[in-house]
Image (cartoon, rainbow, N blue to C red):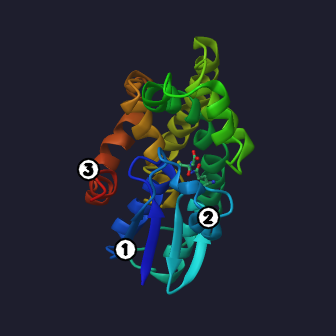
Amino acid sequence: MLELWHNANSTCSQKVRIALAEKGLNWTSHHVNLRTFEQLDAQFLALNPAGMVPVLRHDGRVLRESLVINEYLDDVFPQPALRPADAYARARMREWTLYIAEEPTWAIKAPSYQKNLRPVLAGTKSAEQFEAIAARMPHRENARRWVRAATDGFTREELDVELARLARTLDRMQAALDEHAWLADQTYSLADVDMAPFVHRLAALGEGAMIEMRPRVADWYARMRARPAFARAMGFRPD
Ligand SMILES: N[C@@H](CCC(=O)N[C@@H](CS)C(=O)NCC(=O)O)C(=O)O
């Protein structure tokens, strides 16, 4: 039995939902409401002490970290393959998935928090109350960003620094897509699966021009959106 603790709008959860959908797997949803801090409940922290989604449980065994979960899914459910057969291309795919976990995953947070979180949080509590909630968040850097979004908000300059990081990611994609049809190779892989939610989020944040000005990336994004697995994963809504 496959169970996923996740959130509809979390990019890292979307990565795993795309992989599950590509493989046509059935799974049980445990939707974690990040706005009401269900990720900080003792029950959830017992599953992931980092207080973050996604978490996968497969036949009672727990896994965290979206990039690890997606490789695991491809190991256990090998069809259709989401990793290139060739060892070099597979290593290139891992370069991408690691880079995605380290760079766009973090760069997207400030612009996302500013646009999506700030309007619902700002003014609802005092700075001390927000600090008290953030004190419970195990990931200190994430807690700092969250308080910032809830209180003063990010400055234009700070947001531009993060958008410049994301622009470099798109440049890197454009260069890779000049070489082959998909990010790691001629074949679709976990590199594409893991990247898709971040490009989609940029578009949702009103930064679609960043995508459109890079034709190979725009074409890749159109091909991603055309995949039924992408629509299914992104369209997930909790009951
Ligand atoms: N490295 C982790 C990052 C997971 C992550 O950043 N999750 C976010 C949602 S996209 C989260 O759970 N945030 C909880 C919070 O903001 O308190 C992974 O890839 O699984």
**In the rendered image, is residue 84 in sight?**
no
- In the picture, measured across the screen, residue 56 lies left or right of residue 225, that is right
Q: Nearer the viewer, residue 202 or 55?
A: 55
Marked residue nearer the N-terminal end (1 or 2): 1
Q: CA distance from mark 2 to mark 3?
A: 39 Å
- Label 3: state its secondary structure: loop
Q: Residue 175 appears at what percent x and percent y? A: 55, 37
The residue carrying mark 3 is 226
Q: Residue 238 appears at what percent x and percent y? A: 31, 57
- In the picture, measured across the screen, residue 173 lies left or right of residue 232, that is right
The residue sitting at 34% across, 66% down in the picture is 21
The residue carrying mark 2 is 42
Dot 1 amino acid type: Thr
Establish if 104 lies above or below 205. below
Dot 3 amino acid type: Ala
Query: Are circles 1 and 3 on residues that touch, CB within 8 Å?
Result: no
Q: Residues within 10 Å of mark 1 (few under 14, many from 20)?
A: few
Dot 2 amino acid type: Ala
Label number found at residue 28: 1
Establish if 224 lies above or below 161. below
Q: Nearer the viewer, residue 65 or 239?
A: 239
- Name the quadrant containing residue 156: top right
Is the residue marked 3 within 8 Å of ligand 1, measured from its CB? no
- Name the quadrant containing residue 104: top right
Q: Nearer the viewer, mark 2 or mark 3?
A: 2
**In the rendered image, is residue 29 in sight?**
yes
Is the residue marked 1 within 8 Å of ligand 1, measured from its CB? no
The residue sitting at 25% across, 58% down in the picture is 228
